[in-house]
Amino acid sequence: MADDLSTFIAQSPLCSTHEHTEIDSFYQEARHDILTHLFDNYVIHDLYSAGATSQSIEALLDVSNPDIGSRFSAVETAWQHIKMGGFAEAVRLAAFELFEIENITSESLKKASAGTNLVGGPGERLRLLRDVANLDHVQVDPGRRPLPLEMIGQTFFHYDLNVFDLCNGTPELSELTEITGEEVDSLRTLALSIEKLLEGSHKYVVALKSQHAYKRTLEWTERSDDEAASALTSWLRLGANISEADRLCLGDWCTSYVAKLAAKYNLPFKLHTGLYGGNNFMDLKYIPAGSLSRLVSRHPDTRFLLMHIAYPYSDELIAMAKHYNNVAVDMCWAWSINPIHATDFVQRFIHGAPVNKLFIFGGDALTPAATVGYALQARRWLTRCLRREVTEGFLSEKSGVDLAGFLMMDNPKDYFDVAAKSAALLAAGSDTTLREAGSNPFRNRTRSIRNSGRS
């Protein structure tokens, strides 16, 4: 039976604070079919973990093969093993919402495929995210720079500025030069180039973002300018053959410099913590959020937003949000990693840290159909979480509704200053400063987010 809390969470708009939503031109070129709509997401990593071969997964996502049944049959045994998992739950929710499939089988997929009009056409991406998932807006990490021209003149697709290469100690200098007009040949010119990058972009982006935990430890050490200059010299001379020590040194210096500029321009600094996407390469020493303590302490005026609840090291993340006034936590991806763990995390968080430091949803997905499933999943488990709080007497029905509204909409819109960013994007088309040499952060994208190497 529906109640006020359940109805509110099911029907209210929701902000997504982290996606990798593909740019529209590339989305249309992909010509998605029912199998890529449903399975071109993190569920393939669970399929592989359960025993599906890489060849069968590749075949599953091969839209050039119209034989829907045979493509799914090759992974069906693995699918049976993962159906109760969070990634698969989101697939099942999307299958019912988008294709009216109650039980995913080769036959049900073939039948639904014959009747669907979801084929990657114009306007489909926006309709799925805004109208079906009922999202207020999405915040997209495009994986790399420059920012896409599709940002200009609209207010639904907001973007992060990705700084992975800087934090990783592998700065893409030619890209920086193209965007800023600054040739990098010294630490001074590197700093100037990074400053120009943020100076030209900060009005339009909602945050800075790095996922360098995929390539290096989150542990941070203060580096002197002399040390960083020496490491940069090695990077200029050796490129990818730079030593690990020099790469970490340059990455630490750049991370600190970016954090300082994030404070200057009042941009949150989003950082990946916890579980990796993919299979068979995660180094558990790299991913705990507690490793960021020294960086957070060193930059007290920078707002650090730590992502994915640092799964499985979630309790220390609550401790950081409680202790540091400049640390907040994003639930992006967390509901689908493990919804039971995520639900428990939300309850522990709201009883252990300020609720204005919690952001409740991000699908972290390339395809909008996947985000539809993840949004339904987040609503389902947030309802269960807050219903438990009401049932156990910690919240009244009204206070539960109020908290849900705060977490779903009010808090992210305030933290990211979405109204101001939206106004800047609408005005960007007539902003003459964007046309000045060396200060235009927008370009036509020649590489998709999927093929950025960082999604």
Image: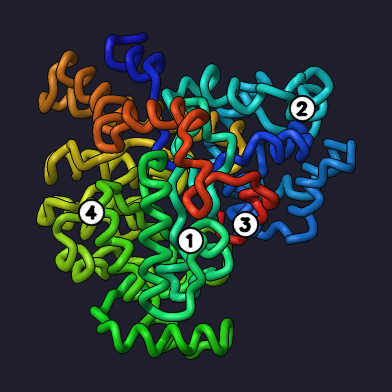
Where is residue 71, by image quadrant? top right
Check disc 1 and report its element: helix, strand or loop: loop
Q: In this view, does 293 lie above or below 271?
A: below
Please say if 295 is above or below 60. Answer: below
The image position of residue 63, as x and y in percent, is 82, 41
Location of mark 4 (residue): 263
Alpha-carbon span between mark 2 and mark 3: 23 Å
First-in-chain label (2 vs 4)? 2
The N terminus, quarter of image: top left
Front residue (pair 176, 446): 176
Q: Which of marks 4 and 1 is nearer the N terminus?
A: 4
- Mark 1–mark 3 Cα distance, whole angstroms, equals 17 Å
Q: Distance between the residues labelled 2 and 1?
A: 30 Å
- Tell me, for residue 276, which label it has, or none: 1
Residue situated in front as seen by the camera: 196 or 329? 196
Q: In which quarter of the image is the C terminus?
A: bottom right
Q: Which residue is drawn at 68% across and 52% down?
A: 447
Q: What element carries label 2?
A: loop
Establish if 261 lies above or below 349. Answer: below
How crowded is the residue under tag 2: few (<14 C-alpha within 10 Å), some, or many (20+)? Answer: some
The mark nearer the N terminus, 4 or 3, is 4
- Which mark's residue is nearer the viewer, 4 or 1? 4
Mark 2, residue position: 119
Q: Which quadrant of the structure image shows residue 38?
A: top right
Residue with the mark numbered 3: 452
Mark 3 residue type: Ser
Locate residue 337, reporting x and y percent. Answer: 45, 48
The answer for how far apart the CA atoms under marks 2 and 4 are is 43 Å
